[in-house]
Structure formats: C-alpha cells, structure tokens
Amino acid sequence: MTRLLDRPPAWSLAVVAMLSVQMGAAISVGLFDDIGVGGTAWLRLSLGALGFVLLARPRYWRWSLRELRAPVLLGLVSAMMTLTFLAAIDRLPLGTVVAIEFMGPLTVAAMHSSTRRALAWPVLALIGVVLLTEPWQGSLDALGIAFAAVAAVGWGLYIVITQHVGDRFAGIDGLAISLPVAAIVTAAVGIPQAWGHITWQVMGIALLAALLLPLIPWTFELYALRRLNKAAFGTLMALEPAIALLIGLIVLRQVPLVPQWVGIACVVIAGIAAERTGHRQEELPELETPLT
C-alpha cells in the first residue's frame, strides 16, 4: 500500500480524500434517526478501526508508551472532531458546517505562513461564515455553530498531529493505533444511543460510511501530509467547503441561497490566498514545484 499511495501526486490524494469525506458525511446523515449522532460516530469509527487493524496488523507491544502518545492523542482528537462534526450537520447544512470547520485548517496555514498578510485570510473566511449562517435572519442555531467551531479546532489539531504521526510510523500503523482509541472514546455516548437499533440495513450503511470516512480519506491524508507541509495541506482544504456545498445540494437537497454561495466563495478564496510553499522540501528536496 505504501508504494501504491506514494506514486500519485500528493495533491490528488488530498482531493480524493475530500470527496470521500463529504460523501461519507452525507451518507451518515441517514443513520441519525436510527442510532443517533453518537451511535453513528461510534459505529463508523469502530468499523474504520477494525479495517485499519486488519490492514496494518499492528504489533502494539513494539512501541514504547512515549512513542504511543502521539497516535493516542490523535485518536482523542479524531473522536472529538467526529462527534462534533456529526452533531453540527444534524443541525446545519453540510456546506455551512464545513465552511465553519475549515477555519481550523485555514488558521493552521496562516500560523505557518512567513508573512503577516496571511492573517487577513481567516478574517475573509469569517466573513464568508457570517454570510453562510445569516445571523440577521433570526434563525441562528447557536448550538450547531458551537459544534462546528469545536470541530474546527479538532480539524486544525488533526492536521498537525497526523503529520507528526505520519513522520514517525510506517504505513498506516499510526491510524491502526489512533482509530481504536477514537472508537473507545465515542463508545461512551454511542453505545447507549445505538443499542437495540442496529439492523442489517444500518450496518450496511455504516460500513459504506466508514469506508468513505474514515478509511479512505484518513489514509490518503496521512500519505499526503508526508509530502506536503501544513500550509499547503491547509490550502488544499480550501476546496472542501465548495465540495461540501455541492454534495449537500446533490445528495441532501440542501439548496443554498445567493448569500451562501457568496459566503462559500469567500471561504474558498481565503484558503487559496493563504497558499505558501507546496512540498516539504527538507524531506523530499527533489519536489520543489509549489502547489498551484
């Protein structure tokens, strides 16, 4: 798998991951009525964890407690990000949630920029988020926005920690450690919600959702982050709010209004404008072409 995923351009892995994430999110919405948000997060992460363990067959005893700290932390962050993201899309349109959540990667990109001008881009993205949420309409879902904001923090931390884990663990070993941790954490809220409601149909949808998110995207993101720096990866994520808006429109029939299209455009422009050097030249000096 390592050789196979090292062949495509790093940016292509990130784009496929984004498409997979949003399709997985859209499919997950169909499980909320049956097993709740917590049950959906737990079942999806549990199936994803099982998949990673079967693929990697990690020998956990090979690593010291010190070495395990980073992937365990990644598991905790992944659990927080998954739970809050699903709770947010239960209350808000998918495109709106992803636009708010994108503030996390964009802030990472701005913080790792070499110029102060990059700090303006999170402000532009915030303007876009305001246009998406339309607080002047009087129907602001404060709790949904709060969930999305926590997911944004989780996404930013996820990028930083995933790159750290990818640098120190071969293949998908790091994910085979972190995903079981995430599944265990979400079990506390997931099992009570899902208990007695897991049918074969639910399992089939959950299995597909787990394949689309986390199995495919988190693997692809891990390999992409081995060849991209945090600023470049955060920049690529600028496409995700637009992808989420389109998936929400096509799959979930969430039709955005004109201000929301403008808001998404602001978020995407902010992400693209925050672009800095594309490849991690200290590790792969032969890859000197920036992402454009």
Image: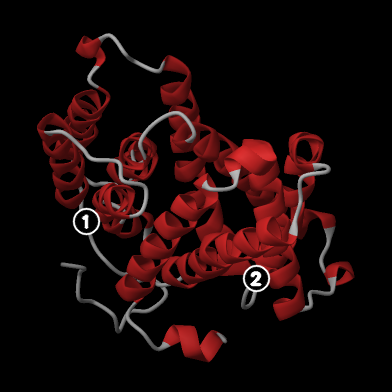
Quick one: label 1, few (<14), some, or many (20+) residues within 10 Å? many
Q: Secondary structure at mark 2?
A: loop
Write down the quadrant of residue 291 in the picture: bottom left
Residue sitting at x 63%, y 50%: 74
**62 or 249, which lies in front?**
249
- Which residue is denoted by mark 1 in the rendering? 276
Q: Secondary structure at mark 1?
A: loop
Tell me if 252 is positioned left or right of 86 in this view. Answer: left
* Colour scheme in use: secondary structure
Question: In the image, what residue type sits under mark 1?
Answer: Arg
For the image shown, how many numbered marks are present on the structure?
2
Tell me if 251 is positioned left or right of 161 in this view. Answer: left
Quick one: label 2, few (<14), some, or many (20+) residues within 10 Å? some
Residue sitting at x 76%, y 51%: 198
Rendered view: 188 above or below 70:
above
Rendered view: 264 above or below 53:
above
Proximity of marks 1 and 2: CB atoms separated by less than 8 Å: no
Question: In the image, what residue type sits under mark 2?
Answer: Phe
Write down the quadrant of residue 102 in the picture: top left
Q: Quadrant of the N terminus?
A: bottom right
- Which residue is denoted by mark 2 in the rendering? 169
Q: Which badge, 1 or 2, comes first in the chain's sequence?
A: 2
Tell me if 115 is positioned left or right of 177 in this view. Answer: left
Residue 288 location (% of width, % of height): 23, 77
Residue 197 location (% of width, % of height): 76, 45
Residue 131 location (% of width, % of height): 18, 26
- Disc 1 to disc 2, C-alpha distance: 26 Å
Residue 173 location (% of width, % of height): 69, 71
Residue sitting at x 23%, y 40%: 255
Rendered view: 101 above or below 30:
above
Q: Outermost residue toward the right?
A: 61
